[in-house]
Amino acid sequence: MQPLLPSKEVGLMGIGDIKFFESGLALIEGEGDLRGALTQLIQLAAEGANSNSASFYVIDAQEKVLKPLVTYGLPAAYVEACGNVRVGDQCCGRAVEHRKPWIVSDMIEDPLFASAKSAALVSPIRAGFSVPVISADGECVGARGASTANVIRQAGSRLSATKLGQR
């Protein structure tokens, strides 16, 4: 696997030019510029979604779970309570399983988030969305998400792809 190097255009103008890597699991142990570039990317994604917290989870295909690679602004208690996310569970796991954006409008009330309800109870995080990260080869390698302390009221509102951080 070739290492992913940060683009010279990392920042507000070059975010569209950054390519996600084929397999992120090997990078969980990584250091240096790559982690810094990913952290900046996740921070920009949070800001683009009008959020002050976001994450990037990568798939451990052997265990069929998502593991946090980068988190930004998420309380440690929330990340710990969510734990490794089984593919098909919680917000990130459902986005990966269905290969489409997934919204949890109220983490305390939503039965599909029941396995991590405790995460919402020990933190101010109440709602969020996740978007699958798909490589150029079509492999889903993880999910990125953003969250908020506010319950999302979808009735009468329109959540566009732009608001979900999609292009």
Image (cartoon, rainbow, N blue to C red):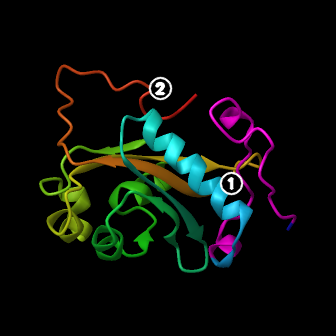
Q: Name the residue beneath numbered marker 1.
A: 139
Secondary element type, mark 2: loop
Q: Earlier in the sequence, mark 2 or mark 1?
A: 1
Quadrant in which the N terminus appears: bottom right
Quadrant in which the C terminus appears: top right
Q: Name the residue beneath numbered marker 2.
A: 162
Which amino acid type is shown beneath numbered disc 1?
A: Glu
Percent x, y for residue 47?
44, 38
Q: Quadrant of residue 76?
A: bottom left
Residue 105 among magenta residues: no
Name the one closer to the observer, 99 or 75.
Answer: 75
Percent x, y for residue 117?
19, 66
Q: Which residues are magenta?
A: 2-28
Vertical side of 145 occupied by 114: above or below = below
Q: Residue at x 71, y 34 (%)?
A: 14
Q: Residue at x 18, y 71 (%)?
A: 118
In this rendering, would 34 be left or right of 80? right
Vertical side of 12 occupied by 107: above or below = below
Label 2 CA crowd tier, 10 Å (few <14, some 14–19, many 20+): few
Q: Residue at x 46, y 27 (%)?
A: 161
Vertical side of 155 occupied by 123: above or below = below
Percent x, y for residue 94?
41, 55
